[in-house]
Image: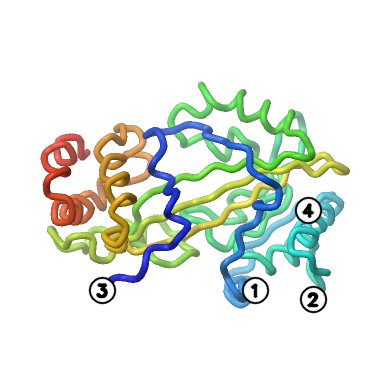
Amino acid sequence: MPPRLDPLMSDPPWAGPPGFGIGLRRIDPGAWLEGGEARPWRRKDALLKRVPGRVWGEVVGSRPGQAEAAGLVASALDVRISGPDLPPLLRAARRIPDDLVLMERRDGDWSVTALSLCAGSFFTADEALGRSLAELHGPVPGFVDILLLRVRRIFDNLPPDTVVERRNWTVTPLGDLHAPDAAAARARAARQRPGASGRGLFLRCERQTLRRLPRTGGVLFTIRIHKTPLRSLALQPSALAAFARAWAEAPPDFRRYKGLSAVSGGVEAFLQASLPDIVTNPVQDIAP
């Protein structure tokens, strides 16, 4: 039997409109950090020791913002964050499952000035450090032309007492949270047996939040990744049906950006086996 579906997926990210969009919603500040991982520092410390530059980075002058961000995390956890002699943001990130990204206004735009990135998919801390919003999201279809100005306004105008959240999803053949290598994903997807009915595929669900740092003016961006075996959807029929609809309705640019063609055979075999009355030709017809 596949593992039990994560209870957080009772509100699955694929239940919203298909395709790309900002999709932010305001949440209670008390629900800012979800928790759910007993000792996140074990996972993160191992990566920091093995590939330090790929999971941590900071620029000169970011320590005040880091310290304020760490204070917000400590307050949310109701603990005093102590431990190794590390930069403040890294010390805070060790205590929570989320990755932490500090965005600050530099040279006229918002850019990454410090980040702990231990669950990145196909990008690493050294690749993101110092990049602006436009540079970070340039590959996203329509972002620069349609969404960039809106996202900048959100960063500029986010009130200090507000926390906003968005979620997104994809399907990947990689089960590890730290998955920086796109070539490895393509190679593993190529080894999938046709008609394997979802075996070896994972739902990757990402929760992002934004909140203002009221004293230093930056924005703290949190990223929480959940990976669940695709076949565990069979244990929650409502989530399975919603995923089937999202898969069938996903537009071509969304599929290309997410690389869904590499996993489409396994996903469609799983859906046709699980929901034969719902998923037939529509999924096959739009697959890239």
Nearer to us: label 1 or label 3: 3
Q: Is residue 91 above or below residue 149?
A: below
Q: Which residue is mark 2?
A: 83
Q: Earlier in the sequence, mark 4 or mark 3?
A: 3
Nearer to us: label 4 or label 3: 3
Query: Which residue is found at the position 31% from the left and 50% from the top?
Result: 238
Q: Which residue is mark 4?
A: 69
Q: Residues within 10 Å of mark 3 (few under 14, many from 20)?
A: few
Q: Are marks 2 and 1 in contact (CB under 8 Å)?
A: yes
Q: Amino acid at mark 3?
A: Met
Q: Earlier in the sequence, mark 2 or mark 4?
A: 4
Indicate the secondary structure of the residue bearing disc 2.
loop
Q: Which residue is mark 3?
A: 1
The location of residue 104, given as percent across then percent down, is 76, 41
Q: Which residue is mark 1?
A: 41
Q: Are marks 4 and 3 in contact (CB under 8 Å)?
A: no
Label 3 – label 2 distance at C-alpha:
40 Å
Indicate the secondary structure of the residue bearing disc 4.
helix
The location of residue 284, given as percent across then percent down, is 15, 41
Indicate the secondary structure of the residue bearing disc 3.
loop
Label 2 – label 1 distance at C-alpha:
11 Å
Q: Earlier in the sequence, mark 3 or mark 2?
A: 3
Q: Earlier in the sequence, mark 2 or mark 1?
A: 1
Q: Residues within 10 Å of mark 2 (few under 14, many from 20)?
A: few
Name the residue nearer the viewer: 262 or 127.
Answer: 262
The location of residue 174, given as percent across then percent down, is 37, 63
